[in-house]
């Protein structure tokens, strides 16, 4: 079972879902950790009160 999870995590690392830029998002948030350099950006596209697309970009120190 542990090997299955490990394989899935490695697959997501190679081809992460929803990673990338989004042109003209309805909502955008960015976070940067000044201590270790982590950065995260999230973009959301809405249709009324429904989320129809989410994208993220980031870089971590670990």
Image: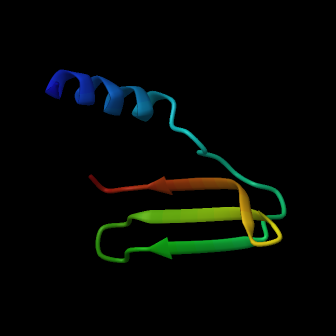
In the figure, is residue 61 to the left or right of 26? left
Residue appearing at x 45%, y 28% in the figure: 14
Taking depth in this image into account, of 23 and 32 the one nearest to the observer is 23
Q: Is residue 49 above or below residue 45?
A: below
Pinpoint residue 7: horizontal percent, then vertical percent: 29, 23
Q: Is residue 16 above or below residue 22?
A: above
Pinpoint residue 36: horizontal percent, then vertical percent: 30, 68
Q: In this view, does 2 lie above or below 49?
A: above
Residue appearing at x 70%, y 52% in the figure: 21
Which part of the image, by quadrant, shows the N terminus?
A: top left
Residue appearing at x 15%, y 28% in the figure: 2
Q: In this view, does 18 lie above or below 11?
A: below
Q: In the rendered image, which quarter is residue 48 located in?
A: bottom right
Q: In the rendered image, which quarter is residue 27 located in?
A: bottom right
Taking depth in this image into account, of 5 and 37 the one nearest to the observer is 5
Residue farthest toward the bottom in the current orientation of the protein:
34
In the figure, is residue 32 to the left or right of 36? right
Pinpoint residue 46: horizontal percent, then vertical percent: 78, 65
User: How many numbered discs, if any?
Assistant: 0
In the figure, is residue 42 to the left or right of 62? right
């Amino acid at each position: 079972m542990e090997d299955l999870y490990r394989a899935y995590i490695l697959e997501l690392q190679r081809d992460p879902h929803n990673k990338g830029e989004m042109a003209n998002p309805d909502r955008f948030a960015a976070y940067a950790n000044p201590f270790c350099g982590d950065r995260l950006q999230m973009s959301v596209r809405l249709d009324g009160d429904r989320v129809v697309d989410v994208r993220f970009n980031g870089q971590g120190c670990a």
